[in-house]
Image (spheres, rainbow, N blue to C red):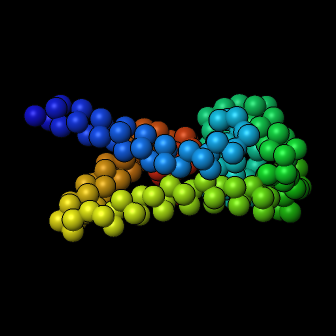
Amino acid sequence: MGDEAVERGLELYRRATRVLHERDAPAWREVELSLSQLRALFALSDAGPVPIGGVAGRLGIGLPAASSLVDRLVEQGLAGRREDRVDRRRTLAEPTDAGAALVQRLRQGSRETLRSWLEQMRPDDLDALVRGLAALVAAGSAGAAAGNGAGRVPHPVLEGSI
């Protein structure tokens, strides 16, 4: 029964996220960024001013690749670089107002769609979902504390952003 329930949960999660992304596709289609650039922008948005090494760590990539991604975001006006006031040898990167607005717009669409779905649910089903999601977060948090998934950037739509 356990394996069957896990497989059913995975399938339902896949279907729900696919429908959620299809509903919000128009906003995402407007974005002219590579997936790597988009991940870097979300990482900057979530981390605030961060050294390039911090971007590399969050994305699980090397320092040169992270620097290149930030450079591309700077060229597009979505991120900025500045000297760290505490340690002038370090350069910090952060989203510009335009970059932060883009991240907010992309996240907001998913949040509103998900909110409407939750509001349509029967109260007992919603309570069961909330309990299940709390258990899932607890299991995921325990796994992260044990080193599973450490250092990766959360999914921009589904983790901590809706």
Instruction: Say whether residue 144 is left or right of residue 3.
Output: right
Relative to 86, residue 68 above or below = above
Q: Quadrant of residue 6?
A: top left
Relative to 140, residue 7 above or below = above
The residue drawn where x is 83% and y is 62% is 86
Instruction: Say whether residue 24 is left or right of residue 115.
Output: right
* Nearest the eye: 17 or 140: 17
Residue 110 visible in the snapshot: yes
* Nearest the eye: 95 or 127: 127
Residue 131 visible in the snapshot: no
Query: Which residue occupies the extreme left position in the image?
Result: 1
The residue drawn where x is 10% and y is 34% is 1
How many circles with numbers are drawn on the protein? 0
* Nearest the eye: 158 or 87: 158
Q: Position of residue 8 (x, y in %)?
A: 23, 36
Instruction: Say whether residue 69 is left or right of residue 133.
Output: right
Q: Position of residue 49 (x, y in %)?
A: 74, 58
The residue drawn where x is 30% and y is 35% is 11
